Amino acid sequence: MERLIYRFDELGQADSEKAGKKCANLGELTRAGFRVPPGFAVALDAYARFMTETGVRARIDEWLASFAADPNSAADISKYEEASVVIRRMVEETQMPTDVEAAIREHYDALCQTTGVPAVPVATRSAGPASHPGQYESYLLISGAADVVSYVRKVWASTFNTRSLIARARAGLPVSYDPIGVAVLQMVDAKAAGVMFTTNPSDGDTTKIFIEANWGLGESVVAGEVTPDSFLVDKASSEIVKRSICQKKTWFTLDPATGRPSFQEVPEDKKDASTLTDAEVQEIARGGVRIEEHFGGAQDIEWAVDANSNLPESIMFLQTRPAKHVTEKKNPTDRIIDFMLRGL
Amino acid sequence: MTAVYGVTQFDLDENDVKSYGAWFCDVTHGTPPWKPLYVIHSWLWPGYRSIQRAYEKLSVPTSKGWDIRLKDGYPYPSVMLTTDEEAKERAVAFRDKIRPYIEDTAGLWNAAKIDLLETYEGLKKKYGLDTYESIKQLSNIDLLELVDDYRPVNTKQWDVHMDFFVPVFYLFGLFENMCRDLLGIDHTNALFSKAMGGFDSMTMNFNREIWKLGARALELGLESTFSGVDDGEALLQELQSSEVGKQWLHEYTEFLKVFGWRCDRMLDWSTPTWLEKPSLGLPAIKMAVATKGTSSINAKRELAEKERIEAEKGLLAQVSVDQRDWFEALMKAAQVAGYWSEDHNYYCDLYAAALGRWITREIGRRFAEASVIDDPEDIYFLIFEDIYRALIPMGRVKLQERVAARKAEWEGYLALVPQMLVGDPAVMGLMAKKDPVMIAAFALPNVREELKADLYGGGSAPGMVEGVARVIMTENELGTLQPGEILVAPGTSSQWTPAFEIIKGIVTDGGGALSHAVIVAREYGIPAVTGCQQATRKIKTGDKLRVDGDLGIVFINR
């Protein structure tokens, strides 16, 4: 019988078809000895079992039989939005097969044991087999087995969000079925977080590491919501060759009033302060160099600094994938001209 | 609407207002109103044809350049904006055309200014004019041909002027916008201002020479002569009466060979050149002698250069690392705006206008002698077509009536307050946003009611100062300026720059971020608030002022 759940240390790069690319990479990172938050991967097979055995896929297909819309027409987007609401409700209201649910609960309980934190807060992140970042949903700060089960199902349901329905319809793929994995991993209590490119993205210089950082969870940087602090580090010497400390107005963090994370105003004393010490920058960069070596190509990495531990254990890696769009060296003159012409 | 001075080409009619939407009064350059000969044959056209040609050559996407009308004796420009489709088409060629200006305006300008000097020398040489006086020897027919050779030389100067003016101001404006977007600052910010300063130009060279001449006067023991005689002509006489005086005058004459090709009012043929009337330069020298010849210019220049280097670093540090390469390239391109702005005054505006004065004044002299007009200066109430009518016939054709009619008209314009805007302020706002040069060239006062200031400026150089105002409307009043006063003027031309050595601050009616007042004030480290529109009307000499160049505002206490 196929496995429903894998621990990260049981997975490697080659396992994207089993557990999704994100889980495979997290597994690879874990095995290679990088500090990754502990967790487990809900396999594609669990999605398959859920969709087929409960009959929810069949119910979706039945509903879709009387659904007509043109995925290439902007006018029909609202139809897909309605379809998305209906289908997602169907998925979220369907009980998981008992053994699937049991497996999730068992692994979550084991996670609470390993971390020593009862009802340990986790993130449930979508992990598609082919790399398509940002197409499905992730949920943060989920605690307790019941919620974990519920949110794993919500991640599965996000394969039926509007743009995914349209994308599959356009490509002629089955609309009612898109198996993905789910990464369930401990939330880092992030003092600061951000992204790292293992080459300079603006000119393709492969001798440099480029880091962007903000306070709190990395969502603010990944989503491009703020202008973060940035650092350029020389790979060979670990020297911070350029730095830009910006005024950081907002961060993504737990809102004590709601118990959910959201974008909030950064406290005054942190707005202009550097998010990272030089030592932290260098440790993150060193991690980047080793990750790039391990994967054999330029990487786009998400990292966080754990507020509850010290260097070097505080530096954690949450994601890695091959870096896209490495810009060829664009002449400053051309960039100036681009700016003169923007808005046309 | 009636044609100004009887010339219909530039009259502002209802169709113009409908078709363009807005025309605004260029008080910066046009105050006081010009006499007909200059405004029609130099300022309006070819001046504006050169602007239009420059925009076309550069293929500026959002604008086809400026157009011009004459109303109530004042110039009224407007902007010819493009449609979105036209902008996209023009952007294609623009990429290539703008490139050399981003990368090496300084190199291009060096070549262009040498070429201009050669053109001016070539013109003089063609007619055998090796001294200023030798123009008197030309026959009438040669003088007529000289006019017709001068006109394309003047056009060429305008073309060169605009070829650089458009991209240089465009890039400066872009840099300022980039600083607003990325750093939340504009040209009024001290760091920005310092990053643009510390450059030499012919204006600074002019200041240095003035101060050297002052020092020489002191060395030669002429201090009492200079301080004892107020009137320029009398001072000249006095200097001619002694050996040391003649010695000094000899050195002054050498100075005039280079720097004397300038009219008293920079862009105008109707005021004398320094070569024509050497006493015009003496008030500035008196100022230098009075400060005991210790010019601060070299020290200020060194300081400004140091501060610029620090400020460049300061700005770059605030920019995200992956943007620094092009931000720095753009900053370097923007820096050219300051010194080009000063430098081109010498090579373009001053020199060409001086040649124009030289030629037209000689015609005026002959016309007055032959009773074609009553006074040589009346020539400036004529237009070239009148001159062509009367020059060869010399004496057979009378032009006093034409002079009288236009003179009366001009005197009327002197007395009135021009309308600031004809048309829709919203369209004006759109022009300011979409024409990439306009906002740097003409700034409207940035009014912030909550500051409760008496005047708001459109441009400024940082710093704050309190002091006594001296309102000066024309160059020849500069002699009344006292050290430590705050100069209040319609604008300034580069003639006025020696005054920056002794004033504490400056307030002007016209001018934006790239006006002389701002650029030179920055080099001297004094505050400036420009583009106030009403400064010379609201402030009286003797008023106590607080000039705040950081906020761009002025408070008046009577």
Image: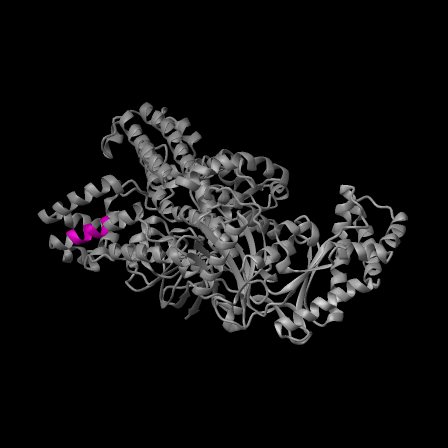
**Picture coordinates of residue B464 (x, y %)?**
39, 66
**Taking the image as drawn, is residue B36 in sight?**
no
| Quadrant of res B528 | bottom left
Is B433 situated left or right of A55 in this image? Answer: left
**Picture coordinates of residue A80 (x, y %)?**
81, 51
| Quadrant of res B36 | top left
Q: Give the range drawn in magenta.
A: B209-216
Residue projecting furthest to the front: A1
Tag count = 0
Is B468 situated left or right of B16 in this image? Answer: left
Q: Quarter of the image for the C terminus of chain B: give it.
A: bottom left
Q: Quarter of the image for the N terminus of chain B: give it.
A: top right
**Taking the image as drawn, is residue B136 in sight?**
yes
Is A208 situated left or right of B287 in this image? Answer: right
Q: Relative to B535, say whether B345 is above or below.
A: above
Residue sitting at x 64%, y 54%:
A24
Magenta stretch: includes residue A272: no
Magenta stretch: includes residue B214: yes
| Dominant secondary structure, magenta | helix
| Quadrant of res A84 | bottom right
Residue sitting at x 51%, y 67%:
A313
**Picture coordinates of residue A319 (x, y %)?**
59, 57
The figure's colour scheme reads one colour
Choose between B115 and B32: the one closer to the eye: B115
**Picture coordinates of residue A79 (x, y %)?**
83, 51
Choose between B510 and B373: the one closer to the eye: B510
Choose between A24 and B452: the one closer to the eye: A24
